[in-house]
Amino acid sequence: MTKVFTCLLLFTLVVLVSIPVHADDGNTTTVPTTTATTTVPTTTATMVVTTAPPAPGASFTGSPTSGTAPLTVQFTDTSTGSPTSWSWDFGDGGSSLKQDPSHTYATPGSYTVVLTVAGAAGSSTSTGSRITVLSPGASQSPISPLAGVGAVGIVILVAGGMRGRKGRRTNLQA
């Protein structure tokens, strides 16, 4: 950031007018007769002050963050501090130098994305999004881990049998 300041430099001028007087004894004496004061503009000065821009702060978003392979994710740079260069590491060996790249994940797995930005005042790195890529046909819902398995029977065995209505022990028979 650059700011320009212009100043008018002024000087005060004091003029003392005096008249020499010669005495009869041959000595000369100076007698002040008048004083004048004035302010005189002499020059204009311009001062330029440049401050360093703030260091960039890396940040980004990615969408979607999970899905089945092949998964294409659009990344958006949300960095602060006016970065001028971007370096993306998508965690699967892929990379980009674009500001807002997209990347396709071909192999199932969990990937950490890293963005490094640089500008006039330095650089910054953000380890942000975790991208989860599932195998084709895999369920994305953590609630139904048995999806696609078919009917599941649940058997509960109670050790020692059960007690009947009158508190007598009853054995289970198949």
Image (cartoon, rainbow, N blue to C red):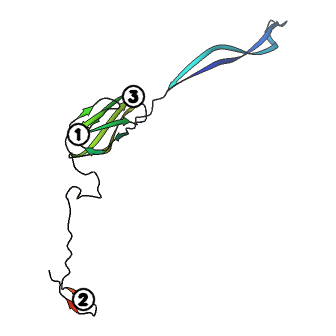
Residue 48, image x, y percentages = 53, 21
Residue projecting furthest to the front? 174
Q: Give above or below for 38 relative to 81.
A: above
Label 2 vs label 3, nearer the camera = 2
Horizontal placement of 61 versus 166: left or right? right
User: What label sits on residue 70 in the rendered view?
Assistant: 1
Residue 131, image x, y percentages = 28, 44
User: What label sits on residue 153 in the rendered view?
Assistant: none
Q: Quadrant of residue 126?
A: top left
Q: Quadrant of the C terminus?
A: bottom left
Q: Give above or below for 57 relative to 17.
A: below
Residue picked out by circle 2: 163
Horizontal placement of 78 versus 37: left or right? left
Residue picked out by circle 3: 120
Q: Nearer the viewer, residue 167 or 8?
A: 167
The residue drawn where x is 43% and y is 33% is: 81
Q: Earlier in the sequence, mark 2 or mark 3?
A: 3
Residue type, mark 3 in image: Ala
Q: Nearer the viewer, residue 21 or 129?
A: 129
Q: Secondary structure at mark 3?
A: loop
